[in-house]
Image: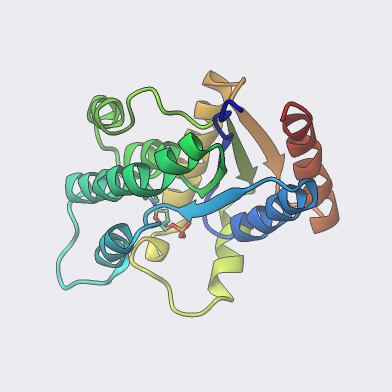
């Protein structure tokens, strides 16, 4: 039997919008449908990429240059693609990724102001034509997301940015979604969780039918 390539889904949004919960909802749907999948995250997803994540999110006595941040994000991504994402898709498994390249456009491009040309070049180099089949963007105002982060305890280096930073990140995500309306599905995460769940299920179900 021909091994059909798996479906690649990424989940995006600013901090505190409920990406982890969304991943759980998708997992439940895939489990119920008997679909084999792997879950990964960025930055991270492999031992080396998780080590890069630690470098990225630690606090330091110096400022991390935006270019350093961007390059490290893509270094981790190269590892995650080679070790986790491509092998899984080639085996016919689905891949759920908690963030992917759109986060670099939103955070490093929109948030930090890094030249978008550099991000495009890195994306072309590191991922070639690999793109998620669907990207679920969980959207909420930055102050709503940040208030949820506050209740989680100690903040990592990026989480210590202010509300203006996260609002720029959010607006960049929304622009990306507008530009690639086919791939992106926006869900308002500032509503009852049961509604978010229902919306996620209604996005996943048509994909299951194609399997
Ligand atoms: P997480 O909180 O979703 O685990 O992600 C860790 C942080 O990394 C989060 O603040 C978003 C940030 N990030 C970027 O700035 N650029 C990227 O390309 C990725 C994947 C994440």
Q: Quadrant of the N terminus?
A: top right
Residue 170 spot, x, y in % from top left: 52, 42
For this orientation, the residue located farthest to the bottom is 153
Residue nearest the observer in this picture, 162 or 194: 194
Vertical arrangement, residue 169 with respect to residue 16, above or below: above
Q: Quadrant of residue 23?
A: bottom right
* Outermost residue, front side: 1
Image-based side of 172 in relation to 63, left or right: right
- Left or right: residue 150 versus residue 169 is right
Query: Looking at the image, which residue sits at the far left?
Result: 62
Please give left or right for residue 91 compared with residue 158 in the image.
right
Against 136, is 53 above or below?
below
Q: Nearer the viewer, residue 90 or 187?
A: 90
The colour mode here is rainbow
* 201 lies above or below 27: above
Image x and y of residue 97, in percent:
51, 47
Front residue of 61/207: it is 207
Q: Quadrant of the C terminus?
A: top right
Q: Position of residue 43 (x, y in %)?
A: 37, 54
Q: In percent of the image, x 35 and y 58: which residue is there?
A: 46
- The residue depicted at 54 percent of the width and 21 percent of the height is 180
Asked if residue 1 can be seen in this view, the reply is yes
The residue lying at 58 percent from left, 25 percent from top is 2
Could you tell me if residue 106 is visible in this image?
Answer: no
**Residue 203 in picture, x, y percent from top left:** 75, 35
Q: Image quadrant of residue 105?
A: top left
Number of dots carrying numbers: 0
**Which corner quadrant of the image does residue 205 belong to?**
top right
């Amino acid at each position: 039997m021909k091994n059909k390539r798996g479906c690649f889904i990424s989940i995006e949004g600013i901090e505190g919008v409920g990406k982890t919960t969304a991943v759980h909802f998708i997992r439940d749907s895939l489990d119920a449908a008997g679909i084999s999948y792997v879950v990964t995250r960025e930055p991270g997803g492999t031992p080396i990429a998780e080590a890069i994540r630690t470098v990225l999110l630690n606090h330091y006595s110096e400022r991390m240059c935006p270019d350093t941040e961007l390059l490290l994000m893509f270094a981790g991504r190269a590892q995650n693609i080679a070790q986790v994402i491509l092998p899984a898709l080639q085996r016919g498994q689905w891949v759920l990724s908690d963030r992917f390249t759109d986060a670099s456009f939103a955070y490093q491009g929109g948030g930090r102001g890094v030249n978008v040309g550099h991000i495009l070049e890195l994306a072309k180099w590191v991922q070639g034509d690999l793109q998620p089949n669907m990207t679920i963007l969980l959207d909420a105002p930055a102050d709503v997301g940040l208030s949820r982060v506050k209740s989680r305890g100690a903040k990592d280096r990026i989480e210590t940015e202010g509300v203006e930073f996260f609002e720029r990140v959010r607006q960049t995500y929304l622009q990306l979604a507008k530009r690639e309306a086919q791939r992106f599905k926006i869900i308002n995460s500032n509503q009852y969780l049961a509604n978010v769940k229902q919306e996620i299920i209604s996005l996943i179900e048509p994909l299951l039918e194609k399997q």
